[in-house]
Image: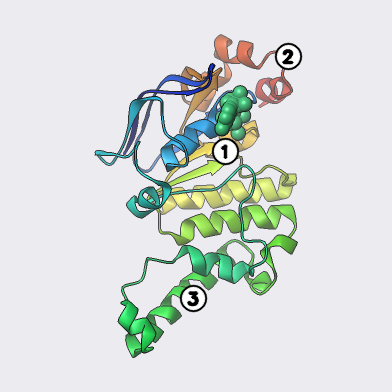
Amino acid sequence: MLELKKVSRLFGGLQALHQVDMHVLEGRIVGLIGPNGAGKTTLINNISGLDHPTSGTIHFEGREIHNLPPHRITGLGIARTYQNIRLFGEMTVLENLLISQHGRGQATVFDSLVFTPRFRAEERRLKDAALQLLERFQLAGMAHLLAGNLPYGDQRRLEMARALATGPKLLLLDEPTAGMNPIETEQLGEQILRLRDEQLTVLVIEHDMSLIHQVCDEIYVLNFGQIIAHGTPDVIKHNPQVIEAYLGREEDAELAGG
Ligand SMILES: Nc1ncnc2c1ncn2[C@@H]1O[C@H](COP(=O)(O)OP(=O)(O)O)[C@@H](O)[C@H]1O
Ligand SMILES: [Mg+2]
């Protein structure tokens, strides 16, 4: 479904990504782990069109996407969340979802200008879909609060709901549990497993190794811009190169313990 071939990204003299090969199969939950500064966010930025490779290719469902702008990539069915939350803080929770659905409806500009029944039916359908997503992420009671006023964990869930509102086939999650407490983290794991039941494909960057083990079919390990290991969670956990990469880092204890 998603194929990266020899993807490199240079920032000046810094090799943020070096010859990354990655193949994500449809319906899989794939973890992307690695120490801070390894290039994980850069990789997701390059897949989602926010940034572009210096060299190498990225294909999604057979189509070349590495030169496309973000909105085109969203249109093809790739959605993402951000490590640094990017919500419209001055809009309500519900409005944040409605604005993401933009472009999904079938109504024409004419329909919207003269407020045809077709337009109204569609507005209702999109709003119902948005409310269902809020329900699913335990945000229904907050629909009319300003997104910027929500606690951190709620904002993270809203980001995920917003990504899903675009109707993606592939979801990219950049540290979705950062700032969450252990209960919220576990619930988020259940949400990710539910996505798998719905045949979504997920690429998730995550530091919480218990979550990675709970949800991932396979894991890629990035270190200094290079993939140093790829395999099932159990294989990765015992890979000496991976343990080495984490040595002296704060994640080390977590990795060994997870
Ligand atoms: N826009 C940028 N300009 C220059 N350097 C960048 C930029 N984005 C990321 N980097 C650098 O690339 C490396 C990888 O960063 P990043 O992808 O954010 O790592 P990770 O998400 O794994 O912590 C870091 O050294 C970071 O400072
Ligand atoms: Mg990052």
* In the depicted structure, whether residue 204 falls above or below residue 91: above
Q: Residue furthest front?
A: 12
Residue 75, image x, y percentages = 35, 54
How much space separates mark 3 and mark 2, taking CA atoms? 49 Å
How much space separates mark 1 and mark 2, taking CA atoms? 25 Å
> In the image, which disc is placed on residue 127?
3
Residue 62, image x, y percentages = 24, 38
Describe the element under mark 3 as helix, strand or loop: helix
The amino acid type, in three-letter code, at marker 3 is Lys
Describe the element under mark 1 as helix, strand or loop: helix
Q: List the residue tagged with mark 2.
A: 248
* In the depicted structure, whether residue 58 falls above or below residue 199: above
The amino acid type, in three-letter code, at marker 2 is Gly
Image quadrant for the N terminus? top left
Residue 129, image x, y percentages = 47, 71
Q: Is mark 3 within 8 Å of ligand 2?
A: no
Q: List the residue tagged with mark 1.
A: 214
How much space separates mark 3 and mark 1, taking CA atoms? 32 Å
